[in-house]
Amino acid sequence: MSKTPPTPAHKFPREHYLNATYGIRSWLLTTDHKRIALLYLASVTFFFFIGGLFATMIRIHLLTPGGALVTPETYNKLFTMHGVAMIFFFLIPSIPAVLGNFLIPLMIGAKDLAFPKINLLSWYIYVIGGSFVLYSFSTGGLDTGWTFYTPLSSVYSNSAVTPAVIGIFINGFSSILTGLNFIVTIHTMRAPGMTWFRLPLFVWAHYATSLVMILGTPVVAITLLLAGLERMFHLGFFNPAMGGDPILFQHLFWFYSHPAVYIMILPSMGVISEIIPTFARKPIFGYSFIAGSSIAIAVIGFLVWAHHMFVTGESTYAALTFSFLSYLVAIPSAVKVFNWTSTLYKGSISWDTPMIYALGFIGLFLIGGLTGLFLACLGLDIHIHDTYFVVAHFHYIMVGGAVMGYVGALHFWWPKITGRLYPELLSRLAAVILFVGFNLTFFPQFILGYMGMPRRYHTYPPEFQVLNVLSTAGASVLALGYLLPMIYLVWSMRYGKVAGPNPWPATGLEWKTDSPPPTENFHVTPEVTWEPYDYKNRPDLGLGAPPLAPAHGDD
Amino acid sequence: MHRTGELYGQFQTLEQQKESATLGMWVFLVTEVLFFGGLFMAYTINRHAFSTAFGAGSNTLDIRLGGFNTVVLIMSSLTMAMAVWSAQVGKKKLVSLFLIATLGLGTVFLGVKVIEYKQKFDHHLVPGHGFDMRYRTQNPAPTDDPREIATEKEELDKAFAADPYINAHGQLYFSLYFGMTGLHALHMIVGAGLLVWLIKGSFSGRFTPQYNTPVEIVGLYWHFVDIVWIYLFPLLYLIDRHR
């Protein structure tokens, strides 16, 4: 921020969406997308705590080779419930339902989403689904792995599978309705002048995410419903003892659950595409390629699911095809990384907190993505399949990628959501702690996996202990990295400095309105006359004249 | 968001509102295609693996009731389309009439479905411990046509010779039968609820040439549910009738 001229102190707006109405009813019956976003923020944070609690217990248990904390059966339940809480109830709704909900109407200049009541309905569906899952957790737990493979889940498991499956089935409709709402909103609710290629890349990313949500989620819904019916009424769809086919379950399950990875990572990529140009003070490099690569990831992402099944019985030709298609996804992902890097080139970079998260994302996503290629390789996958290498790989994508993006986004748009700034120095420190803690937790797991430590085991040979202790130590640092923002973000809601409409400054439409915005988002319907991320031609941002090109002869 | 007349506050114009509602319904129908798609996939795989059991299971269905229901549903699509048309040209009485006709035909379909389900229970063709493909031929009801029972017995004997595990594989067929027709019936019940809501609106003259979006998008939904049946009927009733 040092390069921007000092701005006059801002006044907090007198009327905004937070004080428009009062009382518990005004929240529980609201149709305001901004308030629903906050309802989601509270509920996904709750599930993040639950999932985090299980993760903590897993890491404490693995401190010693014999297992320090729980019985083997309980260990199975811990990693299953960690996965279910984190994937279905935190990662999938996190950025779309919290920040997408809050920002998409603001970014495209609309008063609300196209279907505000359906938006509220989807939150209630989430809560009902979540209640079923919590019921399962507290009455016997769940030990099938988050993948619910049959016939373990449908016949043999003695844990509370049925309520969990019902909960996830119900929760799926929350995701479907959110995706439907976003697609329709982006098509029909754009303000005058907001053409498709003026949309922020965050919106493009959410469009791609919504496509995955509406096309994938129904399939996993029906699949889990069938598995649940099989368990309740002894049907035989996926039970080999009755002629059914467990491989069919795996195909149907991964047809959703691989694209679900893109539900988690695409919105995060959208966040990074907003943060990078803002703090490099430069137009984003290759706008249309980044937008197109989001759609490409969504489309190709649907064609790679069987790479989860290389060792569970599929023909070599199918495996070869899915291996090749899995490599293809790397291309649009790499397009994004290269474009972000090119945006940074000769940018006027400032190290604000969201930027630290964004740069952290690029590094961690790079590692997570490249190790994904190792796993897509047929021969290598035989060696590292179901080891900690896989665990480390997907945590680099989901925690290093998706969660870094989510926390970065919370910091970037927190002034818009609450109207106040958080303490800058502390938040930078927290970002660094989070980055260090994350790497310390998960990098040793790559080595563990490569050396042969299988995932989902409650015990390991003594020679792996050093790396496991490192990982557990990292997890404690990581926990501190998550707790700090939770404390100072809440603190800032009351005591933070007043942010003003556009504290960074950034070019998006959402920064043109008050912070926090009024209930109807804009006092007058905005008309868009500028190109996206046009930091060079926006004197209203107060950035001053663009710096002269350096006098090197080499560019 | 406040509502002025039929225009909800988040929209600028009625056209925008209609475009959003229609697009929303189309997107929803896409999700429905994939929702049913999982079942169709399971059907395809198992039909390929256990064609004898699926053929034998299919032959136990009553093609007359199924055929009758197919006609009923196609008729209901016609009356639904007429209701949409009536709303578009502003014939308010016809809207109510055609909506009631659609609801009536939908109810007839569901009633026939109940009769069919009852038969399957009576014949021990519900997956579970009592399941037995031969139950009907071994315990014919006095009202059953002896010749029909004899043909069925002959066919079943052949099927048992070809697939000794037919009672296990037949359960897969009937699981899919109840799963697919049950899910379809659930959609019909939701559709019937929507029709009741529309009929209530049409009595108060809510639907005009300017504003008839609800009729139109419920129409889309109703046609979709009919189309699902158009696929279900041959897959469940007709696959082994060529002999």
Image: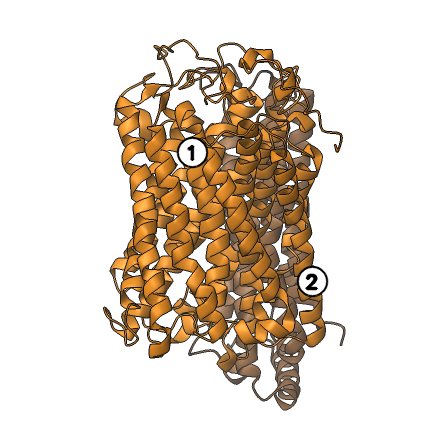
Residue A352 screen position, x and y as percent: 45, 30
Give SS at disc 2.
Answer: helix
Front residue of A148/B221: it is A148
Task: Report the chain holding disc 1.
Answer: A
Q: Does residue A469 show up?
A: yes
| Other-residue count near label 2 (Cα within 10 Å), few / some / many at <14 / 14–19 / ≥20 | some
Q: Residue at x 44, y 70 (%)?
A: A448
**Mark identifier at residue A49:** none
Residue A60 screen position, x and y as percent: 27, 63
Q: Colour of chain A?
A: orange
Give SS at disc 1.
Answer: helix
Most extreme residue toward the front, as rendered? Answer: A552
Q: Does residue A525 show up?
A: no
- Mark 1: which amino acid? Thr
Are labels 2 and 1 assigned to the same chain?
A: no
**In the image, is A512 to the left or to the right of A321?**
left
For label 1, the residue is A353
Residue B37 screen position, x and y as percent: 61, 57
For label 2, the residue is B234
